[in-house]
Amino acid sequence: MAVTGLILVSFVCVHLLGNLSLFAGADAINTYAAKLQSLGPIVWIFRAVMLAVFAVHVGFGIQLTVQNNAARPVGYLQKVNERSTFSSRSMIVTGGVLFIFIVWHLAHFTGHVGVDTAKFAGAAADGHFDVYGMVTTAFSSAFYFILYAVGMACLFLHLAHGVGSFFQSLGLTSECTLDGVGVFGKAVSFILLVGYFAVIICGAVKA
């Protein structure tokens, strides 16, 4: 689970870098999108691999939750969470929300579900699909803005614990480094949260 998590976090970081091209304007993000599409089958192979990694990660998450519940079939009379945090206790919930969100995200921006493709097809300055117009139109909608904001909030909560637990899973932490690893995980997740929220806000403002 640690390995699949690392792969997914790496993708989230790279994906953010691409999305930040929105700040450079229509030409920048449309050119970026056109270059990706020009890779043809390579893009779809990459997407298939990432979906497989994501499916394995989800499977491990469900398996771990079932095992933890089975190990303690009778609940504690009084449960004291000395080390656990809200993000660690809600991993299965935030993970489930992220699963639904990612499926929708792919359907929306890749499959163009709910998108007026006739409006954006060939509308970019270079004749390609106007990704800039599609993104800004989406985020100018209160529904999409809130939907993506909730998704990013869940991503923050999930990574706030997940990044730190990666090091724990590999046995790279000790009593001396545990708190520092936790802070590092929260810092990484916060940076990603700010970055993705900035993209959402930028899309809404530029609409």
Image (cartoon, grey):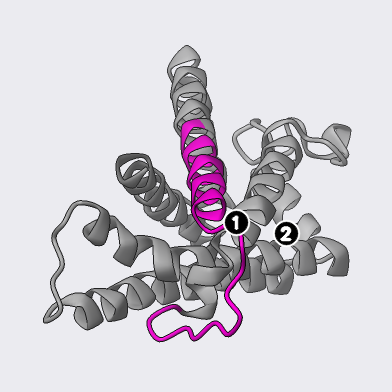
> Which amino acid, by three-letter code, is at mark 2?
Thr
Residue with the mark numbered 2: 136
Q: Position of residue 161 (x, y in %)?
A: 41, 68
In this rendered view, identify the residue nearer to me: 61 or 158: 61
Nearer the observer, 128 or 155:
155
Q: Earlier in the sequence, mark 1 or mark 2?
A: 1
Counting from the top left corner in percent of width and height, residue 34 is at 53, 32
Q: CA–CA distance between discs 1 and 2?
A: 49 Å
Say whether marks 1 and 2 touch (CB < 8 Å).
Answer: no
Q: Is residue 79 above or below residue 14?
A: below
Quadrant for the C terminus in the image: bottom right
Element marked by disc 2:
helix
Q: Is residue 36 magenta?
A: no
Q: Residue at x 53, y 59 (%)?
A: 72
Q: Amino acid at mark 1?
A: Pro
- Nearer-the-camera pick, 151 or 62: 62
| Residue labelled with disc 1 | 73
Side of 191 where 180 appears, left or right = left
Taking the image as shown, residue 84 lies to the left or right of residue 151, namely left
Residue 70 appears left or right of 100: left
Q: Which residues are magenta?
A: 56-84
Name the quadrant of the N terminus: top left
Q: Is residue 37 above or below residue 98?
A: above
